[in-house]
C-alpha cells in the first residue's frame, strides 16, 4: 500500500510530511529510555525482517491482486508503539530513497498510513485493550488479527481520503473506496494470521518481550533475547535472500484498485514539485524496483536477492542507530539534569 507521488498534490504531500514528522518527534520524547535500551537490537533485527517480508507479495485468490504485510502491529507488539513507529519509518525511508518503492513526496503519507495508524492509534486503542486480561496464545491471536485488519482498513481509507484531498479526479471517492476497502480486508486477514503466528511463536520463546511492551515495563536484567534475535535474523535472510524470489507478480492491493477504477496500475505524475521529487529519487535509488538497472532492464534472481539483503542491512543500521542515539540522548539529558 505504498503510495506513489502521482496520488498526491504537493500541498497534501507536504502536509502529511508535517504530520508524520510531528509524530516522529513526539515519539522520541515519549519513548521510555529504560524500556528501549534492552530492545534496541530488536528494533534493528525486526526492522530488517519487516523490510524483507514486505518484498514478498502473496496472491489474493480469485482477484488477480496481491498483498504484503505492513508490519506495524507486529513491531508495536514487540517494541511498543513509539519505537515501532521509528522502526517502520526507517523501513519506509530506505524503501523510498534507495529502491523507489513508494514516492518521495508521498513518504510522509506512507509513514502515516503504514506507521502512525497501526503503531500510535490501533495498537494502544485496540490491540492493548484486547490483552487487558493478560497475554495468552488465544488472546494474542485474536488481538493480532483484529488489530491488523482495522489498521489496513484505516490505512486504505487514508489513501483514498488523501487522493480526494489532492483532487485526483480520475479516482472518485466512492468508486475508489469501494474497491480499496474489500481488497485490503482480504490482505488484512492474511497479514493478521501471519502476525498472530509470529507473535505467538515469540511469546512461546520469550513472553517477557511482549509483556514489556504491553505494560510499558523494563525487561528484567539477565533476560536473554538471543533466540528471538536469531529467529528474526534467520527470517530476514530467508525472506530477503530466497523467498522474495517467488513473490507474486500480481499488482498489490493499491495498484489493483487503481486499475479497477482507471484501467492502469499507475498514474502519471505532473508538475514541478513532482518532477523535483522524481529527480531526487532517481539519484538516490540505486536499485529502483529492487533491480539493478545498470545491469539489466528486467532484473534477475540474483539482483532480487542482493536487493533484499542490502535493503535489510540498511534498515538494520538505520533502525538500530535511531534506537541507540535516542537512548544515548535521553541518558545524557538525564545526567545533565541531575548535575544541574
Image (cartoon, grey):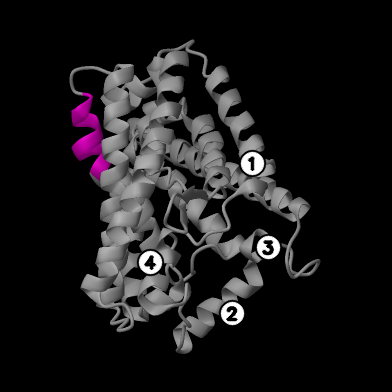
Q: Are marks 4 and 3 in contact (CB under 8 Å)?
A: no
Residue 13: x, y in percent?
A: 36, 73
**Residue 287: mark in rendering:** 3
| Image side of residue 28 versus residue 50, left or right | left
**Residue 257: mark in rendering:** 4
Q: Secondary structure at mark 2?
A: helix
Residue 59: x, y in percent?
A: 49, 50
Mark 3 crowd level (few <14, some 14–19, many ≥20, 10 Å Cα): many
Q: Secondary structure at mark 1?
A: helix
Disc 2: which residue: 279
Give the quarter of the figure containing the N terminus: bottom left
Label 4 vs 2, first from the N-terminus: 4
Label 3 vs 1, first from the N-terminus: 1
Mark 4 crowd level (few <14, some 14–19, many ≥20, 10 Å Cα): many
- Single out the mark in the foreground, 4 or 2: 4
Q: Are marks 4 and 1 in contact (CB under 8 Å)?
A: no
Label 3 vs 2, first from the N-terminus: 2
The stretch in magenta equals 122-131
- For residue 213, say whether it is visible: yes
Amino acid at each position: 500500500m505504498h503510495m506513489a507521488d502521482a496520488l498526491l498534490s504537493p500541498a497534501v504531500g507536504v502536509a502529511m510530511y508535517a504530520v508524520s514528522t510531528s509524530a516522529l518527534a513526539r515519539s522520541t520524547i515519549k519513548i521510555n529510555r529504560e524500556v528501549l535500551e534492552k530492545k534496541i537490537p530488536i528494533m534493528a533485527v525486526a526492522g530488517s525482517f519487516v523490510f524483507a517480508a514486505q518484498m514478498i507479495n502473496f496472491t489474493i485468490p480469485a482477484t488477480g491482486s496481491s498483498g504484503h504485510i505492513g508490519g506495524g502491529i507486529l513491531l508495536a507488539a514487540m517494541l511498543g508503539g513509539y519505537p515501532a513507529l521509528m522502526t517502520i519509518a526507517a523501513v519506509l525511508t530506505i524503501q523510498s530513497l534507495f529502491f523507489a518503492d513508494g514516492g518521495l513526496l508521498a513518504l510522509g503519507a506512507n509513514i502515516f498510513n503504514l506507521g502512525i495508524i497501526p503503531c500510535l492509534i490501533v495498537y494502544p486503542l485496540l490491540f492493548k485493550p484486547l490483552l487487558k486480561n493478560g497475554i495468552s496464545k488465544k488472546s494474542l491471536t485474536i488481538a493480532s488479527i483484529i488489530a491488523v485488519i482495522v489498521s489496513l482498513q484505516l490505512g486504505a481509507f487514508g489513501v483514498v481520503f488523501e487522493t480526494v484531498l489532492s483532487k485526483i479526479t480520475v479516482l472518485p471517492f466512492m468508486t475508489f473506496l469501494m474497491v480499496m476497502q474489500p481488497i485490503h480486508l482480504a490482505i488484512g486477514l492474511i497479514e493478521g494470521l501471519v502476525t498472530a503466528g509470529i507473535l505467538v511463536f515469540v511469546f512461546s520463546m520469550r513472553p517477557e518481550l511482549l509483556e514489556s511492551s504491553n505494560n510499558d515495563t523494563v525487561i528484567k536484567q539477565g533476560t536473554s533475547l538471543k533466540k528471538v534475535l536469531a529467529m528474526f535474523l534467520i527470517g530476514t535472510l530467508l525472506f530477503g535472500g530466497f523467498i522474495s524470489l517467488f513473490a507474486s507478480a500480481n499488482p498489490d492491493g493499491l495498484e489493483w484498485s487503481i486499475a479497477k477504477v482507471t484501467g492502469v496500475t499507475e498514474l502519471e505524475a505532473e508538475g514541478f514539485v513532482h518532477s523535483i521529487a522524481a529527480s531526487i529519487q532517481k539519484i538516490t535509488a540505486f536499485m529502483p524496483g529492487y533491480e539493478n538497472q545498470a545491469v539489466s532492464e528486467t532484473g534477475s534472481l540474483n539482483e532480487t536477492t542482493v536487493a533484499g539483503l542490502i535493503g535489510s542491512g540498511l534498515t538494520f543500521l538505520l533502525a538500530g542507530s535511531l534506537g541507540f542515539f535516542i537512548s544515548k540522548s535521553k541518558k545524557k539529558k538525564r545526567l545533565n539534569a541531575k548535575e544541574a
